Amino acid sequence: MPDNLQIDQLPEVSFIDGLSVDALCKEMVADYERYMTQATGNTVSLARASPHRMELYAAAAQLYQAMQYIDRAGKQNLLKYSYGEFLDHLAAFKGLSRRPAAAAVTTLRFTASAIRDTTIGIPSGTRAATRELLYFQTTQYAEIPAGERSVDVPAVCVVPGSAGNGLAVGALAEIVDPLPYIAGVSNITASEGGADTESDGELAERIYLFPGSYSTAGPEASYLYHAKTYNANVGDVVVASDQAAGSVEVYFLLDDGSAPGPEMVAGLQNYLRDRQVRPMTDLVTVSAPADVPYSIDLAYYINRSDSNRAVAIQRAVNAAVDAYITWQRTIGRDINPSKLAERVMAAGCKRVELSAPAFTPVARTGVASLEGAPQVRYGGLEDD
């Protein structure tokens, strides 16, 4: 899910003024005692085990449930809280709809059994598969010209979603639809671009960014919105214009923090260069951010008094390191060892000795990239 910090920082609201079920119970008991005292002329006070008190509590539980529905109904009109079909209706006010799952793409190279003096046709829809029977099919007709040995053809996964992502070069090596004179097939790029149905967080972010699309003057918000619209697998995006006037650079990462491959870069660039998206005076260039390498090397210690929680703390420390790696993978975010130490300490250890990383400034168009596996050593128990 995207980091919707601007949405998350909106103030909390309550359509029932933050009322709790306990407060409602007390209010109903107080009202009963006051009204009965007025009606009888005698002071009425319900004992803790009074049947009337229990009846009021039961009624309060039902009333509070109804109030929760009222509170939820109000909140579904607000971007901070809306979800599911309610969020779909909020999107409809902006003319937006939830993006369906998108299929991963790659480039297949078909190789002939021998060089021929006639053209060899590759029909559109020709399929190739992995050994695990994940299928990709070509999206256009292609030919191996006479005197040539191979041709490269764009292909798309037949199953939409993220399952088609991450196939290494050469993984698609099985020809499903045999062709005359074709000896083999192989993907020459890693598959990428597959995305599951747009999540609530991703749709909420697009709704929030949508006003930026109103302008045709090329503001940053407009490019952010259109980049997010291109594919649900687009994650962090930074727009810069530090070169000549009219030159716009767009840098992006995939939703899982990984760098985009050539298909995703080319696809987003073509999308942003469309005349309906970019101002005519803008030259748009799309690329992955430059990697700024760092490593993690630390040792940590646990208080002896926490020895009964030592195993749980060790697991929490490893989870904290993983969370730091994810947090650090944001375009333009400086490599900050203090954040790593803070997270490790919050996991419950006594102290941490941090050898790496060192603080390193990261340019606005760069991104921290972990080199190697993190070295995280448990140093043992120490006296408090």
Image: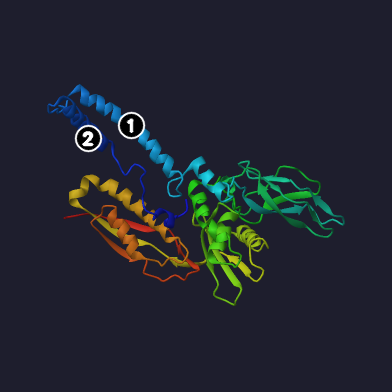
Asked if 320 appears above or below 368 in the picture, the reply is: above
Mark 2, other Cα within 10 Å: few <14 / some 14–19 / many ≥20: some
Q: Please report contact status of discs 1 and 2: CB closer than 8 Å, yes or no.
A: no
Q: Amino acid at mark 1?
A: Leu
Identify which residue, 236 or 108, lies in the foreground.
236
Q: Which mark is residue 63?
A: 1
- Residue 145, by quadrant, is bottom right
Q: Is residue 82 left or right of residue 359?
A: right
Q: Residue 299's spot in the image, x, y percent?
A: 30, 59
Please state which amino acid type lies under the numbered disc 2: Lys
Q: Is residue 134 left or right of residue 110?
A: left
- Give above or below for 359 relative to 176: below
Tell how many labels: 2
Task: State how the image is colored.
Answer: rainbow
Q: Which mark is residue 12?
A: none
Residue, disc 2: 26
Dot 1, how many residues are within 10 Å of its Cα: few (below 14), some (14-19), or many (20+)? Answer: some
